[in-house]
Amino acid sequence: MAGRNHLYIPGPTNVPNEVLNAMHIAMEDHRSPIFPQLLTPLLQDLKKIFRTETGQAFIFPATGTAGWEIALTNCLNPGDKVLIYRFGQFSHLWAEMAKRLGFDVEIHQETWGKGIPLDKLEARLKEDSKHEIKAILATHNETATGVTSDIAGVRKAMDAAKHPALMFVDGVSSIASIDFRMDEWGVDGAISGSQKGFMLPAGGAFLAFSQKALKATETSTYPRCFLDLRDQMNTNKDGYTPYTPNLPLLYGLRKALDLLLEEGLDNVYARHYRLAEGTRKAVAAWGLKQCAHPGFESNTVTAVIVPEDKDARHVISTAFSKYNISLGAGLSELAGKAFRIGHVGDMNDVSMLGAIAGVEMALLDNGFDIKAGSGVAAAIEYYRATAK
Amino acid sequence: MAGRNHLYIPGPTNVPNEVLNAMHIAMEDHRSPIFPQLLTPLLQDLKKIFRTETGQAFIFPATGTAGWEIALTNCLNPGDKVLIYRFGQFSHLWAEMAKRLGFDVEIHQETWGKGIPLDKLEARLKEDSKHEIKAILATHNETATGVTSDIAGVRKAMDAAKHPALMFVDGVSSIASIDFRMDEWGVDGAISGSQKGFMLPAGGAFLAFSQKALKATETSTYPRCFLDLRDQMNTNKDGYTPYTPNLPLLYGLRKALDLLLEEGLDNVYARHYRLAEGTRKAVAAWGLKQCAHPGFESNTVTAVIVPEDKDARHVISTAFSKYNISLGAGLSELAGKAFRIGHVGDMNDVSMLGAIAGVEMALLDNGFDIKAGSGVAAAIEYYRATAK
Amino acid sequence: MAGRNHLYIPGPTNVPNEVLNAMHIAMEDHRSPIFPQLLTPLLQDLKKIFRTETGQAFIFPATGTAGWEIALTNCLNPGDKVLIYRFGQFSHLWAEMAKRLGFDVEIHQETWGKGIPLDKLEARLKEDSKHEIKAILATHNETATGVTSDIAGVRKAMDAAKHPALMFVDGVSSIASIDFRMDEWGVDGAISGSQKGFMLPAGGAFLAFSQKALKATETSTYPRCFLDLRDQMNTNKDGYTPYTPNLPLLYGLRKALDLLLEEGLDNVYARHYRLAEGTRKAVAAWGLKQCAHPGFESNTVTAVIVPEDKDARHVISTAFSKYNISLGAGLSELAGKAFRIGHVGDMNDVSMLGAIAGVEMALLDNGFDIKAGSGVAAAIEYYRATAK
Amino acid sequence: MAGRNHLYIPGPTNVPNEVLNAMHIAMEDHRSPIFPQLLTPLLQDLKKIFRTETGQAFIFPATGTAGWEIALTNCLNPGDKVLIYRFGQFSHLWAEMAKRLGFDVEIHQETWGKGIPLDKLEARLKEDSKHEIKAILATHNETATGVTSDIAGVRKAMDAAKHPALMFVDGVSSIASIDFRMDEWGVDGAISGSQKGFMLPAGGAFLAFSQKALKATETSTYPRCFLDLRDQMNTNKDGYTPYTPNLPLLYGLRKALDLLLEEGLDNVYARHYRLAEGTRKAVAAWGLKQCAHPGFESNTVTAVIVPEDKDARHVISTAFSKYNISLGAGLSELAGKAFRIGHVGDMNDVSMLGAIAGVEMALLDNGFDIKAGSGVAAAIEYYRATAK
C-alpha cells in the first residue's frame, strides 16, 4: 500500500530517523579500551531521565517484562509477600508473573479505568503492622486502559503508614513521556523499556534502583543469573557489560537521550500532555467516553470506549486495512469494547491530527454517529491555542 | 522540534524508507562485468514509466533543468525557432533557458492558471506553413500554478496542422504521477526528474526520446558534451555510462521503479487523483480558490489563492514555524498571493488529512474566515467514499 | 582514525550492510493481522539452520547467556544434577550459572585446548546407572580457546551408555558457521545467539528444542517467566510473541537467513573452514602454537599462544591503537598468554589476509621473531589453491 | 559471494558508513528559511579544502565531467584558444571536450607516465607573445596513469612567461587527497568531484574559481544555462540554489567535510602518501614497474605495468571473480598493459595490505613470477616504520 503506515499504538512507537541511523553502525569490540566511553555516559544520562541522583541506572538486553522480573528476583527473597493493585492488563500480567515466580502476591482488584486507590493503600499498609509486605508493585501508567496512577501519592501513603516496603514502579509507558521523579517520590525500582518514550525498538530494559533496593540484592537468595543486577554492577563500574551488549541499541539510546535532553524533560512532558489533551478533546467532540476515569487520564495513550452496540475491533480493522493507520486494540476484558490511540514518542500536532482524522473515517465507516471533522476541529482549536 | 517535519511541497517529495535504504550501499566498480545487470534493466523499466516502447530512456546525473537543456541542445541546431506557451514560473524558466542558449524563442503568454490553449496552438501551427518552428516546448504540469495541460490535445493540434515540429514535454512534476503516454501522444522528448513522482532525491534527470528526436541528435551542430545524448547512447548500449554514475541514485531508482510498477501505473495515477481531489474538496470547503482554472487542475500540486487582504507567505511561515509543516510558496508573480500544497509521491489519505488539518490551523491563525475542521471534513467524506 | 576498524573478534561479527539496512525500518504493530507473515516463516527457516525438522525453534529478545538459562530453567527441575566438562571460559561460565541457579552441577575439568573427552563421558554415564544426571551441558565451540567438541560423539557416548539425559549444546559460536545437526545428533536443546554466525548485533537468543525437551517444560517446576518457553509456544503458534518483539532484530534475521540459505549451509561451513585453515597456516608459518590441541581446532576462532616471554595483551593493544584492527583477548587463565583471531561471519579471503597482515605487524612491533609476510604467504598459497 | 567486495579502484571510493548515514535523511524544503544554515557553511568549508580564501566555491548536482565543461564555458568565449598537455585518458577526454565545445585546442602530446613538462610549457608561453592562449588546462592527477603533475611549477612557468592565461586544474582525483593550494598556486578554476577524496558517491561537481575567473564569467558569451556559474552566484549568496539541490549529497558532504577537517588536510595528504608508498614498495618487491615515471607518482592511484607476455585484464578478472576485489583497468592505450590500484579515500594500512595480498593472489594465479608474500612484506615493513 503506497504511503507509509501511520503508527498510533502505545508502543513500539515511531523511531526517529536520526535514531535509526545511529543504530546503523559497524560492530565493534565490546572489550576494547574505548568501549567505556560509550557505556559510562549512557548510564549517567539515563539517571537524568529517571530523575535520580542517588540511584543507579541499568541497561539490560531484554524487554520491559524482564524489567518486572529483575525487580522481583533481585531485591526480594523467594516467597516474599508483595502487594499489587490490578486495574488493567499490564498490572494483571505483573501480578501473574509474581505468582509464577513464587512470591506471595496480594492482589487488590480495582475498576479498569481507575488507578491505585491511595486511601485503600494507606489503610492496608497501616494494617500491615508486622511489615509482611516486602514490596509494592505500582503500575504508573496502565497501558491497557490509558490510566496514570499517582506515584507521589503512593509514597505519601507509605510514609503515612511508615511502611518500609520497597516500591517498584512499572514506568514502561510513562518514563521519558510523563512526569516521573524517582528520588523525589522515593521509588526503589523504576522499570522502563526502550520502545515507548525512549523512541527505540523493543529490546532494551532500562531500569533504575535506589541504594536501598541495591542493598537488598546482596541478601536476596532468589536464584538468578542472566537478569542479575550484581553482574551488571560488577562490570558496569568499569564501563563494561557482563555479556555481549546490543550495540545498535546502545548507540540508538545515545541519540535518543541526546534528543530528550536537548528538548528538556519538562518540555517532553508538556508536549505529551498537549498531544494527549488534543486527542481527548476529539474524543469528547465525538461524544465518546474514555476508559480512564476523570483524574486518571494518561498522556501517552487514550483508550476510547465504544457504545455497546459497536465492536471496537471493527474500527481498528477498518483503520488498518482501509487507511493504513495502526491503533491499539482493547486487551483482555476490553477486547471489542475499546480501541486505543497512542500519543507517545516522536510526535507532534500534525501527526496527531492525521491520527484523529483517520480515526474519524474509521468511526464513520462503522456507523458511529459522529460528525465528520468534529474531532479534528476540537483538536485544532486546542492545538492552535496552546502551540508556542 | 520534536516529531518529524511534514513535507507537502511539490518536490522534493518524501522518499520512502525502502528507497533510502536501497541507496545506502557500498560503492562498486562501474566498469565491472556485472554493472550492466543493474543499468540495462533500469533503462528498460524506465521506458514503462514513460509509456514508450519505440523510444529510448536516459538517466543523467543532473536535474530536471538539465533535462530541459538536453532536449534543446541535442535535437535542435543553434538559432532554431521554438514555440512555447508560458503560464507559470517553470514554463517561464524554460523559455528563458531557450533564449539564453541562443534559440529563436516564440513565447505566447497565457493566463497563469490556464494551460496550453489548443485552439491557438493549432492556428499558429497552421500559420507556420514553412515549418520554421522546429520544436514545441510543452509544460505538462506547471508546478507553480498547479495546472496540467492536455498533451494529447497538443498532438491533435499538431496533427491537424500537419506540423512536423518536435514536441518536447516538461513532465518533471507529472511523469510517474499523472497519466502520461509518450508513444500514444507522439512525444519526442519527455523530461522528468528524480525528486517528484519517482520519490527520489534530486540529482537524476530521467528522459525519453523518440526515434525521430534521436535521429536529430546526429545532425545537431549544437556544441555539447556533458549533456550529450550520443555519449549515453554509445555507452548505455553495453550497459555502461559515459562517466561515473551516481550509484545510490541508480539503486534507489531500482527500488522506486519496483514500487511504482508493483502498484501499477494506473493505480498510481488514480491515487494521485484521489489525494488531489480530497485536497480540492478541502480548499472549496474553506471558500478559497485554486489558481488553476476549471479543467486544468493538477493532481500533483494545488496552488491556493488567498484573498487580497491576506499574504500567503504568512500562512506558509506559520505552518512551518509553528506546526512543522512545509508548504510550497507562491513563485514570482504569485508570491504572497498563493501557497501550494504538494500531493505527489509517497502519500496516502491520512498523510493528506494531516496536511489539510495543518493548513487549517495556519489559516485560522492568520485570520482567515474558515471553520475549523471544515476542510478536513470535506476531504474525509471524499476519501471515505472513494477508498478501496 | 581514518579508514574503518577491522573487526576480527569472535563476536559480535561484522554485520553485512544489507542486514543493517533490513534493520532500518519503521516500527509496526506487533499485534496486527499481518505480523504472523513475518514471524512464522522466520521460525520455520530458523529450524533449517539448526537442522531440525522434529524440533521447534525460538527467538528471545535476549542474549546467548539467556539461552543457557532458558535450557536449564525450562527443562529441568530445581536441584537436578547436570554434567559439564569445563575447558574454557564459556564452559566455565555455563557451569557457574547452573550452580547459581541451584542445580547440582558435576564439573569435570579438562585441559583448556581440548574438548569434551568422549571416553570419559561414556564411562561416567555408564557409571550413572540410576540416571541421576538429568542433563549434559556440552559446549560445541569453546570461544575462549578456539576448540570445537565432537557433539556427534557425545550422542554416541550417551547411546553407548543408554543414558536418557537431555543434551543441551552451547552452539553460540558454532551454529550457522560450523557443521551442526540437531536431529541427527540427538540434541535436545541447541543454544545460539545473533551476534556470531548469524551476522546480527547481539540481542537475540536463537534456540531449538527437541520434543523431549519441550515435554519436560510441562513438568518443570522451576520458577520462570520472561524466559519461559511455554509463553513463546502459546503465542508463536499463532504467529505472535508474548511481549513486544525487537522488530529490527526480526527483520535483520529475515535478511540474514536469506543470505545463509542462499549461500547454502554446506557452503557456509566450507567457507568458514577455508577462512580458518588459512589462518592456521599463517599461525604455523609464524612458528606460533594454537591453544587448540590437534583435532579440536575451531573454524570460527583461532586462539594463538604467545611465547612465555611475551604478553599477548601488547599484541592486541598495538593492533588496536596503531593499526585499527580488533583482536580477541585471552580470557581468564589465558589472559596475556593468547590472542584470538575471529574468522566467523561475513568474511572472505581478502578480509582474512588483511587480518593476518595486521597481526604480523603487531607481532613484529612487539619483537616476535617472525618473518614479515610469512603468515600472509602461507595463507595466500592455501587460499589460491582452494578458491573456486 | 559472502563477505564484502573490496574496492580499490580510483573512484568511486569507499563511502564511510557515517557519510552514508548522513545521506539517509528525510527530504526538506530547499526554499525554507533554515536551508541557508546548511548550504552557506558548506560553501565556506569547501573553500578550506581547495585552500582558497580569495576564491569562491561551488557545488553542482553533476559530475567531474560537468566540472570541466563549467570551467570552459563560463570563463572563456567561443573559439578561444586553450592549451593542454595530454598524457593519459582523462587529459585526452578533457581535450576532446574542449574541441567538441568549439574551442581552439592546442594539444601537446606527452608520454603516458609523465606529467606536464614545465620547461616546454614555459617556452610555449613565452612564444605566445600575443597571449592568444586564453587558458591552460592542467591535469593535476591523471587517474589513468597514476601521474601527478607539478601545478606549482605550472604557475612558475606562467609567471616566468608573464602569461595572463587562466589556469584551470582538473583535481578530480587529487583534491582532498593530495596537496593542493589554490591561492598559493594561482589556480583560476579548480575542478573536483564527489566520488574520490571527498568519499561520496558520484553526483557532485565541486569547484572553486578565482576572482579573475569569476570576472571572466561576466563577459563570456558562451551559451550556457544548467552549468552557468552566474545562476549559482545569484542564489548561493543568499544560501539557496538555482534548482532543486541533491539534499543527500549536501548532507553527505557536510559529514565528509567534518571528517576531513577533523583529520586535518595535512594529515589527510600524509595518509595518502603513506598508503601509496606502501603500495609502491609492494610493486617494487614484485619486480613490476609503475606507469608513472620517477617523480610523477600519484598518491591516489598506482598504475602497474605488466610484462609484455601478460594481459593485465586477466589479473583484474581473476581478482574480481575469484577474490571479490575490484581493481582499476588500464584505459585506452593502457588496456591490457596495466592495472590500477586505487589508494584514495577512506582507507588505512590494513585495507591496503588486504588489497596488496589480493593482488598477489591474482598475479600468482596468472603465472606472474613473484614470490607469495613479497609485496605484503615490503608494505608491512614500510607501514610499521611510518605508523604513528
Image (spheres, coloured by chain):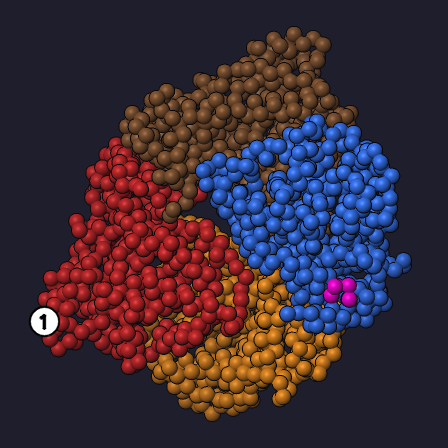
Chain colours: A orange, B blue, C red, D brown
- What residue sits 22% from the left and 67% below the top? C186
**On screen, residue D222 above or below B288:** above
Given residues B24 and B58, the one toward you in this image is: B58
- What residue sits 55% from the left and 15% below the top? D109
Q: Chain of mark 1?
A: C
**On screen, residue D153 above or below C167:** above
The dominant secondary structure in magenta is: helix
Classify mark 1: helix, strand or loop. helix
Q: Is residue A260 in view from this perspective?
A: yes
Q: Position of residue C106 (x, y in %)?
A: 18, 69
Q: Position of residue B373 (x, y in %)?
A: 76, 71
Looking at the rendered structure, the kind of residue marked 1 is: Glu
Q: Is residue C292 left or right of residue D217?
A: left
Question: Which residue is identified by label 1?
Answer: C127
Given residues A268 and D313, the one toward you in this image is: D313
- What residue sits 78% from the left and 44% below the top? B159
Q: Position of residue A64 (x, y in %)?
A: 46, 71
Question: Magenta stretch?
Answer: B277-281
